[in-house]
Amino acid sequence: MTTWTLIRRSLRFHARAHLGALLGAAVGSAVLVGALVVGDSVRESLRQMALARLGKVEFALASNDRLFREQLANDLAAGLLRQDDPGNAAANARTSSTVSARQIAPVLQLPGTAATSDGTARANRVQVLGVDERFWQLANQAPAFKTIPQDSVALNETLAHQLQAKVGETILLRVQKPSQLSRDAPLSQDEDASVALRLNVSAIVSDGQFGRFSLQANQIPPFNAFVPLSLLQSKTDGTNRANLLLVGTESSLPSHLDTGDRPKSQSLLTSAATLSGLTSALRASWQLADAELELRDLADGREVDLRSRRVFLDSPVEQGALNISTNGRGILTYLVNELRVRDRATPYSMVTAMGAPVVSPDMRDDEILINQWLADDLQAKPGDDLEMTYYVVGVMRKLEEKSARFRIRAILPMTGAAADRALMPDFPGLTTAENCRDWDAGFPIKTDKIREKDEKYWDEFRGTPKAFVSLGAGQTMWSNRFGNLTAVRYLLPDPISYAATNPRSLAESPDSQKSPASQREIIGSALLGKLDPASLGLSFQPARALALAASAQSQDFGGLFLGFSFFLIVAALLLMALLFQFGIEQRATEVGTLLALGFTPWQVRRLLLGEGGGLALLGGLIGVAGGVWYARAMLHGLSTIWRSAVGTSALQYHARPATLLIGAVAGVAVAWLTIWLALRKQAQQPARELLAEGGEFQTSNSGHAGRPVRFEMRSRSIKVGTLSSMAALLLIGFAALRSETAAAGLFFGAGALLLIGGLAFCSAFIGALAVAEAAGKMTLSGMGVRNATRRRTRSLATLGLLACGSFLIASIGVFRLDAVKGAEKRSSGTGGFALVGESTLPIVHDLNSAAGRDAYGLDANELAGIEFVPFRVREGEDASCLNLNRAQKPRLLGVQPDLLSQRGAFTFTQIAKGWPKENPWLLLQPREGGVVPAIGDAASIQWALGKKVGDLLPYTDERGRPFQIRIVASVANSILQGSLVMSEDQFVERFPNESGYRMFLIDAPSNKVEKARATLSRALQDVGLELTPAAQRLAAFNAVQNTYLSTFQVLGGLGLILGSIGLGVVVLRNVLERRSELALLLAVGFRPRALKWLVVSEHGALLLLGLGVGVASAFVAVLPAVLSPGAEVPFVSLGATLGAVLLSGAVWTWLATALALRGDLLKALRNE
Amino acid sequence: MPPPNSLLDLINVTKQFVSAAGLEPLTVLNGITLQIGKGESLAVIGPSGSGKSTLLQIIGTLDRPTSGQVILDGQDLSRLDEVQLAAARNGQIGFVFQAHYLLPQCSVLENVLVPTLASKEAALRHGAEDRARKLLERVGLGERLSHRPGQLSGGERQRVAVVRALINRPKLLLADEPTGALDRASAQNLAQLLVELNQEEQVTLIVVTHALELANRLQRVFELRDGTLNRSKI
């Protein structure tokens, strides 16, 4: 005989009595396990979505607007094979590890819009992907077709659903044309920004067939339209070009077998090593054309000209080109509006800033050389003053006309280096123009100024510069963020001293240095050796690793659902403890016997705890099975009624064995702890009392017996009640004077204080009832209510559980976010703006200016009173609560801080320590070197990024240079959720090639909003402008939190219903304890029905009182929400929940009463 | 000084119960002094409500006197804390109640061994099962070791309770109305058993009883009346 034997025997013998407690433990454990499994499921679902959208892609190189050769994919693949060749020691020595042969697919990825041919359905923000068969080989499950027929398009399921399109139908795609010259750059074309394609839908591609492809981590699938690569190339002037390389995984395992469960460190190491190998292979394979550079032999064969398709040479190219040789000469050519000497003027001429051989080193920056043609036209001579007028492009393509004055130093003949038409770069709107009047220079050309002689000059000399200034002078006037040069020239032959530094050139035969073509190759090799592809945006990212990291670090739904289910778990455990305790109380004589036999109270409790532990263990194991069911139910809820919180219905059940084990262990531990708490005061009565005939556990009232104790306690309760109520009233008064944000919290506090006060008054009331003398006529109900005073602690516990539960459920609504209330105020989450606009293609003109509106055919009168705050956009991951994944690189917005500061838009919740608190938007101006300040929404910062104000976020600019973003402030619950906002200046410095604006906050008079929306949507349809009322956008963000609150209310309501079952148990217990007393009432003539009413009125009073106190307090707490216009307080569901609790409590009370009073009550008297 | 052979000494033991406020406390035991030697057997009789059970509970450390001393084997019980009292109950005192208070979930043998679970003395636990079997054999329940209390008669249950009370070799065996719930035949058998075990186990026996037949079989009989304990003339 051992202690364990006694425990086992007791468990088995009292199994029926323990059944209720077992169920309570099982429910508590099931909810706990289930909540954790929900977390597992969401995480795994996101992981599967990540794997589905990437297929077999492991690395990606996305160069956005920079187009490289499509052939680079093959060259890279060949380069990787060479690396793998064991005989190629030299190649292998360069790389830190070999990289196995992999599938590499080139893609041309462009933003666009889609619409049905009849225009009834549209989709903006469409990802148009030009692909070939190599792309589909990276799918987990390749579609039936190998390639898409020409003039056809394959849609993914999401886009097909949006357009209601089927195979065989025709749709219209409008695709952004990549511009050689950024549309923000000087002299860039105004028109021809997009191209329309009318295509036949040839297939609908499922998610598994790569339809969901995207490099952005988001559970919401994108709109994808797949077209033949060659078609998209030809239509967008990108023949044989691509801007995305996808590199497949080493193995060809389908994703469902690829668990990705490599040890994290190994996975990262492998990924890093492979990335290094890929980067090496890229450096070995790339060519100048991939950097959009080309070297041209000039006509005289003595010079090589380096120029770019992008017109201006990027800063890294300029530095590299000038560093590889002392022979390199920078050239900057510009189109000026006018050259004037006295009263004579020549319009629209090319002017070149350069050095030798045309401009001598001693020429000053205020001097100018003019060619003979210009001298004749202006009748100018050396020494004359010349005025040059030209445009520079400012913010939002604002043209600013500037002028500079020079002194004519000399006149050059129209021969030799000064008559070189190749000095003009290939300006897109100029080079191919037949005549001057056809020029598209990105600014208005006054054609009436163009004379016949100017046309003749163009015919004969094309873009030959008419004047020359020093390079310094030119760069002072015309440098812009896109570059300071339009070309670099190298004089040949030249003993290339840099050749030794370029291994590629070492492979050349020494004799090859002699021919110009070879010289060109050497220069090209040297330049490629000098340039880092990453500095031009050509770098591989570990797409797969990043995607898996984003899903692994996603929103913790396990913790979230534990929070939601908290009250349900507490109710289950309380019920378990209650039932277990009742079971123990029925074994009073057994406990007394053990004490009499020499067991200490602690030893007795240990035995009971052992029994409780056995119950908890069994309950935990049952709970695992129940948890699976609970998790599935929750996932079903998330996919249906709570879908607003997750934005997807693709959540699948998944449970890790470890999670089930942890959940079970936690459930057992929590249940056991609860039982321990319940048993703390057991076995404290003397054995003789427990063994006395009819002995029972008595609740200790501690202290003195009789009236003095009750009076003290009543007095204390009244004091507490009065103080709490007064404090609540004070808070309400104070709250009425405060702002909305603060008032909500104060009202909640007032409600909580009222709850405490209400419970205290109830306690005093019960105490008073216990000692009150009967006054006047006694009724059955009165007797019943008075009976509630007998087991004061038990009554108060039941009342408290019901009050607290109903308060919590009803008042949590105060935290519901209301997007409509005060939406017009600057301090609200809308910033006071009426509309939010997002365009697919960039809008380069200033919509606040007449010229800008005119450029888009907008009527100035229609838009009177409408003002735009434009934002530049650097695409990244959505860092809002709508994205369940952890955003690794959030979307960046660039804005002029003044535009928001002047308006006092949004409310700031926090400013970083040490930063000034006045004019928070001006904090976007940089203070720390190399660190860019940014402002974000508080929810985005905390939940989506996992950061706080003051933290740093590493980022990489367009040139592959790392920099840091510091979060300097946060705004409250705003439409800026999902992005980080920086100053426009900092934005263009880091991302100069992000042209135009793609997001707008729009002010509009309230009576013009809808009209403005319609007008703008129509006029800017081609750029895919989508306008949403700001309040509606905010409501979409708010829907997530509000859905969470609804979930809490529903699950809390279930907990409350469970609590009402507890009330039934209390009824049963109370009645069973008093059977003999009730039998006596029966014996003196009370009818059975009257007895039932007596019991029901006792416990019904507790039920009504508990719910009443809770609901009344909650009403105060939610008063702001109730009074708020447009607030969506869920009266129906709340009423239904509380009604269900009341009904459940009433039903259980009645059932317990009937159960307890059944049978021959009078037998109890005879046993006495 | 108690005599050398004295096992139990009650010195001026008084027990009062506090009634409702404002009323005099009820004195149930009034200055009781008694010495009981080792191996002695003694009965306490008296009318209902005279305090016999209270006296036994005080002796058995289930209650504390309002004043006075209870010295068990030279140890003043009033100086012991609850843990020490429990140890005394477990190791030195055996109690038999009117109701057997057997644990319904345990077998006969297991019920007898329950007190050994509370003991910290390894010596007591060692060999307890053999002792239990022998005692049960002795009381005629050798064939019922695995039976549950529900399968036994009233008399058999009470015999099990007696064996349970003796399992830890107590010095003092207290029985409170041990035959009160039994039929005549069973009561006689039990009475005989108690007397025999008193002699065989050399355990001091104090019995509270209404049954004069049982009382007369013991060495001394005391009557408790009006709070005082006097030698009975029966």
Image (spheres, rainbow, N blue to C red):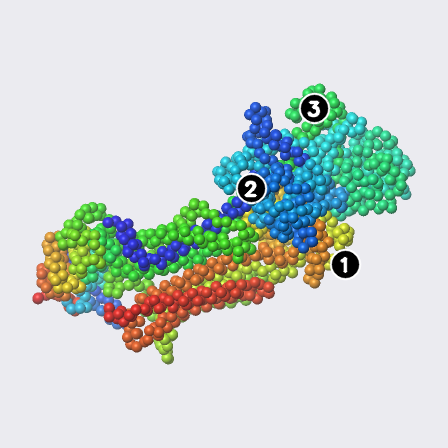
| Three-letter amino acid code at the position of disc 2 | Gln
**Can residue A333 be spotted in the picture?**
yes
Q: Are marks 2 and 1 in contact (CB under 8 Å)?
A: no
> In which quadrant of the rendered image does the C terminus of chain A lie?
bottom left
Residue type highlighted by circle 1: Asn
Answer yes or no: is residue A927 visible: no
For residue A509, above or below residue A983: above
| First along the sequence among labels 1 and 3 | 3
The residues bearing labels 1 and 3 have C-alpha atoms spaced at a distance of 66 Å
Kindly identify which residue carries mark 3: A497
Q: Chain of mark 2?
A: A
Asked if the residues shown at circle 2 and circle 3 are in contact, with their CB atoms under 8 angstroms apart, the answer is: no
Q: Quadrant of residue A774?
A: bottom left
- Residue under label 1, please give it: A861
Residue B102, given in percent of the width and then of the height, sits at: 22, 57
Read off the chain for label 3.
A
**Alpha-carbon distance for marks 2 and 3?**
53 Å
